[in-house]
Amino acid sequence: MRNIGIIFRRELAAYFATPVAYVFIVIFLVLAGAFTFYLGNFYERGQADLDPFFGFHPWLYLFLVPAISMRLWAEERKSGSIELLMTLPVTQGEAVMGKFLAAWTFCGIALGLTFPLWITVNYLGQPDNGVILAAYVGSLLMAGAFLAIGACISATTRNQVIAFILTVVICFGFLLSGFPLVLDLFQGWTPQWFTDAIAQLSFMTHFSTLSRGVVDLRAVVYFGLVIGFWLTANAIVLDLRKAD
Amino acid sequence: MIETERLTKRYGNLLAVDDLSFSVGQGEVLGFLGPNGAGKSTTMKMLSGFLAPTEGIARICGFDIEKEPVKAKREIGYLPEGAPTYGEMTPATFLDFVADIRDLRGDHKRRRLDEVTSRLHLEPVLLQPIDTLSKGYKRRVGLAQAIIHDPRVLILDEPTDGLDPNQKHEVRSLISEMAADKIIIISTHILEEVHAVCDRAIIIAQGRILADETPAGLEARSPRHNAVTLRLGDTAIDAVRPALESLAGVAGIETHDDGGMTVLPIGGAELLPAVGRLALERGWDVSELQVESGQLDEVFRQITSADVGQETRT
């Protein structure tokens, strides 16, 4: 546990030691705002809620979260520091957790900085703040799931661009696995239960329950399982491919 | 104590390390020598727990590096090849991070941090990002990181690569000072370094041990071992040559451009007394007379370029 904390602090500090963190946060906030007000018709709807804001999160995350996760391990491989980290007395699990939690916290900070929107909507009307809180929780959980996928992919390569693209593609698959675009790929040649199972994996459906304010335990467990699965895979990938 | 048993590493079809067995005890400084691609770094990566061996076992202070990796790694200070660090950190924050992971706390931690920064002269750059430092400083940050917890085992992959002669000298004396109560393994292709710091040298090529001896023992394998070099004052070289050649135990004579000549022995026989006596008897004007100890680089070339299959394996 102590080691997770130490790695966590180092990683989190690393984000802010370079312009990466600030660039990311600014772009995230600008896009989140632009989507909400222009594409989401925040004012025109005349409703005191943050639906237009949260509705775009899956799409924002699809491109922005892989930009965070791509460097997690690929950069360590590239610079060789993975050799240093892996020969320190830490377990793979501790390293994976420390890095993941730092990246997740960083996402949380970016997400938290959208609070002016929450203030705006409270100023303009009387929104159901319980719903907004649930949506924030759901959004953070979904970001964690994207990150866990990205962390695992990042561990497979030393090339950050490859990590980014693969992560976007896989996340896109998970995002839309409840939609015909993905389901049609499996329909017909796989058994029905398999197609149904794929449909159940959709980030979109689980996120939309949460963002409507329903703290559905199944959705929370679902995101927890996705994160757990990909982080375990991450540790296994590291174990299999430490060098190069 | 470091022990390896039949340590082997394969990358696909490539046999990088082939059946390496050796052990190193406390107080020993072992030098790994070998041409590039000989398997030195791969061996060190396996000893430090970074790479899993394909076959065989490595034990560090009794801990199997594969079965009890964390316990084994606690005993090791490791400088990977190229001294990688986190470039965006400063030496201060980086060393602090390593000290935390190494479980150093409170006063002890502060004392160790102070000691390694002053030992490696890192004070002027403590607050600069490591990325902006010179190669020499980067290497020293890597070294500082390796010794911060005063480990029982030090594994240093090319510790003096990229350092200037003064820094090299300092790092070597640092290694020699620490040697008494530690096990130190260094890899290098600078042969004078072996002479300067190691009390044992293992030469590997193509993943196999070709020689395992003291540096002096290696030098004794040189055709120049015990050769006598003399420089003559007024006497002409041609005048003394036949007499020297007829001495017992002389294999041949080399003349140098600067007027000196070297008498090579057969099988490392001692020539100095005979040569000295001869010079006295004949009344040669000898201005300089010295015994060669043999040259490591010559031995190195001789061993590593020989057919690997025919070499005896130790």
Image: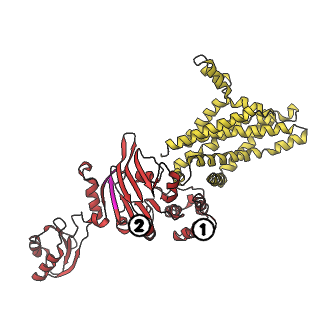
Chain colours: A yellow, B red
Which residue is the site of mark 1?
B108
Residue with the most extreme front position: B62
> Is B188 colored magenta in this rendering?
no
Q: Amino acid at mark 2?
A: Gly
Q: Nearer the viewer, residue B24 or A173?
A: B24
Tag 1 and tag 2, C-beta contact below 8 Å: no
- Give the SS element for disc 1: helix
Residue numbers of the magenta segment: B201-209
> Is B205 colored magenta in this rendering?
yes
Visible residue check, residue B39? no
- Same chain under badges 1 and 2? The reply is yes
Q: Amino acid at mark 1?
A: His
> Viewed as shown, does residue B100 lie left or right of B181?
right
Work out how far the residue at label 1 is from the one at label 2, CA to CA, in angstroms: 24 Å
Task: Residue B88: give x, y in percent of width and height.
Answer: 60, 56
Q: Is residue A33 above or below residue B207?
A: above
Q: Nearer the viewer, residue B6 or B206?
A: B6
> How many numbered markers are drawn?
2
